[in-house]
Every structure is written in structure tokens, then in C-alpha cells.
Image: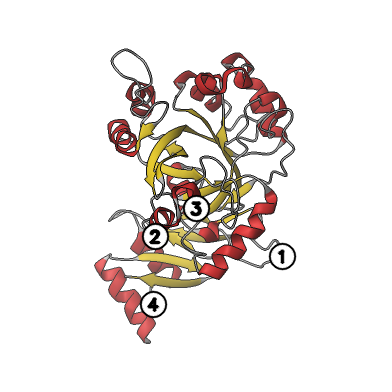
Amino acid sequence: MKVVESGYKIDLHIHSVCSRSKDKGKVAFNTIDNIGVLAQKLNTNSVQMCAITDHDAFGFEMYKALKAYENDEQCSVIKVFPGIEFTVEFLGENGPTVLHVITVFNDEDEAKVAKIADCLVDDKGKTAYDRNSAFSEEKFLSIMRSIDLDTVLIVHQKRSLTSSHPYKNDAKTVGEERFQEFVYTDYFEAFEFKNRKNEVFNKNFLNAQNLTEDIRFITGSDCHDWQYYPKETERDNTDFVYTYVKCLPCFRGLVMAITDHRRIKTVNSFFNPTETYTKSLMITIEGEAYEIPLSRGINVIIGDNSIGKSLLLHKLTEYRKQQDTFGELISIAADRKLFLSAVLNNTVKTIT
């Protein structure tokens, strides 16, 4: 049983030497031989979930090298995701506009992850651009289908939404109408900013437009030289702040967090450290003792048929059927095995 006890610090925008086709010498240091430097920098900054997202390229061996540090006692990293920063041309109000799209992939099928790079090149081994040094939106979606992995899409929005001069490759450069389409169709799971001061402007804009739940913002270092991480380069003086997410350290957990603004913060304040809560349940079934750990808030128990959900529910209620309406709902749900049972400070709630 997995329990969320704290938010996780993330950075899903880090470059390696695999970005050299666009970044040239800026990423020269970021070779696989120096992956230990990145791991040490991530540890120094207590980063727990991360991804190397290179420009229109994926280095499987680079990904595996960083992934080797997962759960290492000398490193804070507990989850490394495969990813790419795609250069995509979208049709905006003023014609074609190039956006940068951070794409994080589900890592559960390693065989498919290993083939990601093959989906990015043509039959001559060159990056399969169809719009100069970018992919058309149609080509981008075609590549996604060929990779055939679930994704989280995060688009650049480095300047605040209220800025009269959008940053190059920001989502707002497509114009207001197309930007609203991105927002209301959930085209992207989140929008990435970098400078701390933009957070205030963005939140004010969202509140004014009643878009608080429709746009999720996260930060990314966009580091191009691991020696100076989390700075982008040695000369970078951006007031960078990390993002924390409330989730399990896995791809599905990341999806749940990135699609829910309540699970994203720039301070790790999801849980009140002084809050009183039930840390675990001790039960005995047929003479065998079990300890069930619980997290703060609502704990949901989900599982297939015949794995013991009803048994646990009956044990928690001491096999008694309450006579009130809530108790009748519990009995019906338990009998039909169509429920999610949740424990909140010794209170059992059932959802059919």
C-alpha cells in the first residue's frame, strides 16, 4: 500500500548534449560521462521527480543513466521520466507560430520507451521536420501516435499571461482565440513558467478570468549546463522557484497532479504538520494481524473483485449493519461489491 506523506519537488525541463543540434555548445558539458554531476545537483536541490527533455531528440541511454540514480541512498531522485521538448508549429491568428512543448511519457513500457528516438527521424536518420526546423501540428500528433505512450503535455509560457510582449515560443503567441482553444479543450495539461515574479501576475489573471481550474502552471529549470543547475546557464539570474506536486511518484500520479491545480504548489504546504490524523489501522483477520498505513485526508481503497475490500469494510464496522440511511448504503455497496471505500479519521465513507 502506497501512502502520500509529502509533496514531491519536480523539474521536467532539463537538457543534455542530445539537444546540441539546436543548442550547440551550450550543452557540450552535459554528456553521459557527466551524468553524475546532474545527479549531484539534483540531490543538492532535493529534486525528487525529473525528466531530461531535449530538443526534438531522445537519448535512451542518457535517460537510463539518470534513471540508475532512482532511489539511490546518495541521491534525492525517486522517479525519472522519459521526455522530449518538441518544436511544434501551430496555426495562430497571425499565421504559423512555433511553440515549445514539453512532452513527458509514461515509463511503464520500457520497450516502447527504447523506440521513441526511432519515431523522430526519417528513413535517412534525420529529424523528420516538415516545417523548416519544426514539426507541423499534424506531424507532431502523428509522432505521438507512433510512439504510442500516454503523455503529459506542457507548453512554454515563460512570461506572464498579462504581458503585452509574449516571449518567443510562448503559448500566448498564437493569439487570444487559439490560446482560449488550448485552455478550454485542455490541449495541454499545464503551462510552464520560470520566473518567480510571473506567478503572482498569472494567479491574478486567472482569478480575474475565472480560469483558476482551467490552467495549471508549473516551473521548469530549462537547464542547459549541469555545472550551474538549476540555472539555465552560468549567466542566468532568473529568480527560479521549484514546483511541488501532491501525488504518488509514478506517471499516473503525475497525471493526476498536473491536471488538478490543487495538487500543484510552489511551496510544499499540502499537509498541515500539526494536524491530528489516524496514521494507521490495526486489524486482525483470522488470527493474523495487519497494519494499514493511512495518509492525511481521505484514503481511498481501490481494487479488483475478491481481493478483500468487503472483508476490510466489514472488519472496520465490526460486521454490524447500521440502521440509518448511510449504514444501508454501506450494506448495499458491500453486498454488490460496487464501491470505493474510504477511511477518514476512523469514519468509513462509501461511494457507489
**Residue at 44% in and 33% down:** 87
Which residue is at the front of the view, 6 or 301? 6
Q: Can you identify the residue that label 4 sits on?
A: 320
User: Is 288 on the left-hand or right-hand side of 308?
Assistant: right
Crowding near the residue tagged with mark 4, few <14, some 14–19, many ≥20 C-alpha atoms within 10 Å: few
Q: Can you identify the residue that label 2 sits on?
A: 184
**Residue 67, how many percent across, how many down?**
53, 27
| Mark 3 → mark 4, Cα distance in angstroms | 37 Å
Q: Which mark is residue 257?
A: 3
Which tag is nearer the camera, tag 1 or tag 2?
2
Q: Which mark is residue 274?
A: 1
Crowding near the residue tagged with mark 1, few <14, some 14–19, many ≥20 C-alpha atoms within 10 Å: few
User: Is 318 on the left-hand or right-hand side of 219?
Assistant: left
Which residue is at the front of the view, 279 or 221? 221
Which tag is nearer the camera, tag 3 or tag 4?
3
**Which of the image's four quarters has the C terminus?**
bottom left
Q: Amino acid at mark 2?
A: Tyr
| Mark 2 → mark 4, Cα distance in angstroms | 47 Å
Which tag is nearer the camera, tag 1 or tag 3?
3
Q: Earlier in the sequence, mark 3 or mark 4?
A: 3
Q: Is residue 328 visible?
A: yes
In this view, which residue lies farthest toward the left?
Answer: 336
**Residue 324, how many percent across, how many down?**
38, 87
Crowding near the residue tagged with mark 3, few <14, some 14–19, many ≥20 C-alpha atoms within 10 Å: many
